[in-house]
Image: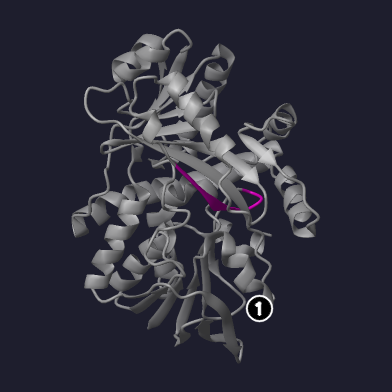
């Protein structure tokens, strides 16, 4: 079939890879000048099945109240005169109820583990390089009660297939000597050795290059304007550069997916959530962590990407505003400098921000739509890098008329 993929981020490109493997004639369209230049460009770098729990969790409403008025709050909410934001927010709060949060975590875990298991196959097939680290992810804690609660959560995740172990302070430092710099505050950590980290942008760009060499067509620098329908199907996609017809169409435009779908009568509850990251050069003889870390106290993640250290975090609900607020980026930089003062050259830090597509229940939307040949693979929130291979393989199977290897019913748009 002729399959048109809308979006050349890590989600769209990985799906295109699997669609090409299945023998389809694939075209990928993106408004940027190359692949992975928006949300996939400078994320936290973690491939983290251990972080499959959605943002909508029982303690989140309390934390939001606690952080009110803080400009450096990990979660900053700007109320707007937008009924869609209010509706989304009410759904989000409903998913904070413990039974729903538990079910959503189980569903996220299923696709995260599936995806993590597929990445070695992609590496074997393509020889792709993307600053991969397979040393696991360590969540570090300063509070004993928080560590004990995380340990209980980790035991449950272990029953779902994501194994972890509790480490004391000395074991954490033995795992990564860079933690000596903050040993006075460190209580212990939760270590998930099977998780990974890597540069999502390098992966996306290099995989796009491999796909192009295998026959996938990429149309960069073209803004998607509308989908044209005929007889209950999508007939073509209109861009500012032309029209593209196809037998099947895949929506992978992240936060911008709802804007294209609304004229078709499809209400996709994906809301943009701004995230920030800071990248610093580390050079040689540095004190940067070598194991990917999650700093639970400050809600930040650290990943070593070759000769760079990536620090990412915060969430800001401010609609489609993509302006980088230096105060929030500098707050991340300051916390990283305090935690690891000899990590690298903080004066050469590069700031970045982008919109992450978040659903009220924190799960992606993967599956068919009311149009026979329109499919969705979007709304992954902060887990796009973690879930890209699994969701790409599953939607490729579905488009190809085959049964996906995992049950994807929970990710259907029909759940809303």
Furthest-bottom residue in this view: 231
Q: Position of residue 96 (x, y in %)?
A: 69, 40
Q: Which residue is mark 1?
A: 264
On screen, residue 71 above or below 409 = above
Q: Position of residue 215 (x, y in %)?
A: 26, 76
The residue shown at (37%, 83%) is: 1
**Range of residues picked out in magenta:** 351-361
Q: Inspect this view and state whether residue 295 appears.
A: no
Foreground residue among 50 and 73: 73
| Magenta span contains residue 355 | yes
Main SS category, magenta section: strand
Dot 1: element: helix
- Tell me the quarter of the picture where residue 20 sits: bottom left
The residue shown at (43%, 78%) is: 4
72 sits to left or right of 116? right
- Tell me the quarter of the picture where residue 301 sits: top left
52 sits to left or right of 414? left
The residue shown at (55%, 30%) is: 331
Foreground residue among 356 and 333: 333
């Amino acid at each position: 079939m002729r399959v048109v993929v809308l979006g050349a981020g890590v989600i769209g490109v990985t799906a295109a890879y699997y669609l090409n493997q299945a023998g389809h004639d694939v075209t990928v369209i993106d408004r940027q000048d190359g692949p992975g230049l928006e949300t996939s460009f400078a994320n936290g770098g973690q491939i983290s099945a251990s972080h499959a729990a959605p943002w909508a969790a029982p303690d989140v409403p309390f934390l939001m109240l606690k952080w009110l008025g803080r400009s450096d709050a990990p979660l900053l909410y700007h109320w707007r005169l937008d009924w869609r934001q209010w509706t989304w927010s009410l759904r989000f709060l409903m998913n904070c109820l413990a039974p729903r949060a538990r079910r959503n975590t189980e569903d996220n875990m299923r696709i995260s583990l599936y995806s993590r298991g597929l990445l070695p196959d992609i590496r074997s097939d393509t020889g792709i390089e993307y600053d991969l680290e397979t040393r696991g992810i360590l969540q570090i804690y300063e509070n004993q009660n928080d560590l004990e609660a995380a340990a209980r959560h980790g035991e449950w995740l272990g029953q779902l297939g994501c194994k972890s172990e509790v480490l004391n302070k000395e074991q954490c430092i033995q795992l990564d000597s860079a933690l000596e710099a903050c040993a006075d505050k460190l209580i212990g950590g939760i270590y998930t050795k099977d998780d990974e980290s890597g540069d999502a942008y390098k992966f996306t760009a290099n995989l796009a290059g491999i796909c192009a060499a295998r026959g996938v067509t990429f149309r960069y620098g073209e803004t998607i304007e509308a989908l044209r329908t005929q007889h209950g199907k999508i007939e073509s996609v209109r861009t500012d550069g032309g029209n593209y017809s196809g037998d099947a169409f895949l929506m992978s435009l992240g936060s911008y997916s709802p804007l294209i779908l609304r004229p078709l009568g499809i209400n996709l509850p994906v809301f943009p959530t701004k995230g920030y990251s800071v990248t610093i050069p580390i050079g040689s003889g540095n004190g940067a962590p070598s194991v990917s870390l999650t700093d639970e106290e400050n809600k930040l993640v650290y990943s070593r990407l070759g000769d760079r250290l990536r620090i990412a975090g915060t969430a800001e609900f401010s609609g489609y505003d993509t302006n980088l607020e230096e105060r929030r980026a500098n707050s991340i930089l300051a916390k990283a400098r305090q935690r690891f003062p000899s990590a690298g050259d903080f004066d050469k830090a590069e700031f970045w921000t982008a919109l992450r597509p978040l659903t009220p229940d924190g799960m992606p939307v993967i599956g068919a739509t009311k149009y026979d040949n329109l499919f969705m693979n979007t709304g992954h929130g902060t887990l796009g890098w973690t879930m890209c291979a699994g969701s790409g393989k599953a939607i490729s199977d579905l488009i190809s008329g085959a049964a996906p290897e995992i049950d994807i019913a929970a990710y259907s748009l029909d759940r809303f």
